[in-house]
Amino acid sequence: MGREKTVFVCQNCGYRTGRWLGRCPSCGGWNTLVEEAAVPQPKLKKRGVLNFLAQGSGPVPITEASEVEYSRFPSGIGVLDAALGGGLVKGQVSLIAGEPGIGKSTLLLQLSKGLAEGGKKVLYVSGEESAGQIYLRAKRLGALDERIVVLPETVLEKIEEAADEVKPDVLILDSVQTVFSADLESSAGSVSQVREVTYRITELAKRGGITAFVVGHVNKEGQIAGPKVLEHIVDTVLQFEGERGSFYRVLKVVKNRFGPSGEIAVFKMTSEGLREVPEPSAFFVSERNAGRSGTVVFPHTEGTKPVLLEVQALVLPAVYSTPQRRSEGFDPNRLSLILAVLEKEAGIFLRDKDVFVNVVGGVEVDEPGIDAAVALAVASSAKNKPVPPEVAVFGELGLTGELRNVYFAEARVKEAKRFGFNRVLVPKTVAEELKEEGVEGYGHVKELLEAVL
């Protein structure tokens, strides 16, 4: 009997090769090629998802294309509905990813409870827990309802049969990495299995008008595990974030075909489950010690609704010969650039200082508007001078020290003033455009620091 033929598949992008390579030629990832059994790829049949998208029509001018009205229904979780643009849509497929133990299963069980109370039938498929384990958690959360049907299963074909039998309004799959198709010989969680399972669940949802939620694992870097095509297939990508040992959780809408992206929903973890936080700005700045140096408020936004965040900095004499540069919720490489600009353009020497920056609340901020807040917080700690409690600041910092405009400036200013921050420090171009009382514009970081400190 001959040796079974195998192939090496990249677990990041799905690239296939007949021999092992240290680095994937397609995506450049190191040690991502895993040996799998080489089986013929199943021929693509006429999928329902294609029929759903085409709606039986041929090519037409865009001016003659009819507008589609998506009817929404509530999920039972108000902050989630607001983040998604007003509720859920029939046929919508959402991917929820987050660290192990962050509360994904808890959120989905509470979501099932809210949907069941709204008259929706929910099929909760779990490939990680038994029916008894799900029952114990549902009992603790008060989510026992006859309209929630539980199915512990990992075989995709059996899940499809159960969906055809139950005919649910909502399908929840926890998680996509534990489910496999019998048509493929590779193990569950492989690139080919994840891709096939996601395609088939999407087809099932589009064909039957089922709203689907799929749980995805994350890798050690915090990115969604599996091929990148996983995020392209689904309609909505939700990132569940939070720090271990803390009670707050942030659900960020990374992608949304039925509404704005970048919105966030904030929850508080309690013994009874996740509790909604309707005013995240008040939540994030509620415990702020405004009388101390190294703290400043930053109006953050990636979607349409801004949120006030507290940026903290701590500057100390270096303990070792190489100063430490560490940050939580902020890119450490960006922090190094800001420190270099502060030294050259503002005369604040930090080459022999340890610098620590933290965005309070566990929110990951990757927008350039936080640059001015980080610079001001670091300078405040270095000089040991507190920032006035009524001050909020935002703006991008250039390498020559100039302050640049950022998007949604007017919304940021309104959110800051709504919570009593009467001095909003912004780039000069923003102040000239808004011309509002309490909005102070500065063209250079040195001018900003001199005005405040």
Image (spheres, rainbow, N blue to C red):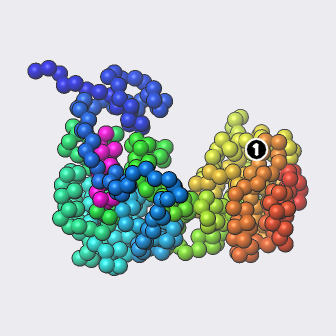
Q: Is residue 199 magenta?
A: yes
- Answer yes or no: is residue 100 visible: no
Q: Secondary structure at mark 1?
A: helix
Residue drawn 36% across and 62% down?
91
Horizontally, is 25 left or right of 436 in the view? left
- Residue 117 point in image, percent of width and height: 34, 79
Q: Can residue 329 be seen in this snapshot?
A: yes
The vertical placement of 96 against 420, above or below, is above
Can you tell which quarter of the image residue 341 is in? top right
Look at mark 1 in the image and give the residue it sits on: 339
User: The N terminus lies in which quarter of the figure?
Assistant: top left
Q: Position of residue 218 (x, y in %)?
A: 42, 48
In this rendering, the count of numbered labels is 1
Tell me: 147 left or right of 97. left
Residue lying at 46% horizontally and 63% vertically, measured from the top left: 66
Dominant SS type (magenta): helix
* Quadrant housing residue 68: bottom left
Residue 378 among those drawn in magenta: no
Report the residue that reaches farthest toward the left.
1
User: Magenta part of the protein: which range?
Assistant: 192-207
Q: Quadrant of the C terminus?
A: bottom right
Residue 371, percent from left and from top: 72, 51
**What's the residue at 39%, 43% (across, down)?**
226
Q: Nearest the camera: 427 or 55?
A: 55
Quarter residue 56 falls in: bottom left
The residue lying toward the viewer, choosing from 284 and 76, is 76
Q: Few, some or many C-alpha atoms within 10 Å of disc 1 (few <14, some 14-19, many ≥20)? A: many
Identify which amino acid the numbered label 1 is placed on: Leu
Place of residue 92 in the rendered image (x, y in percent of width and height, measured from the top left): 39, 61
Residue at 51% in and 63% down: 259
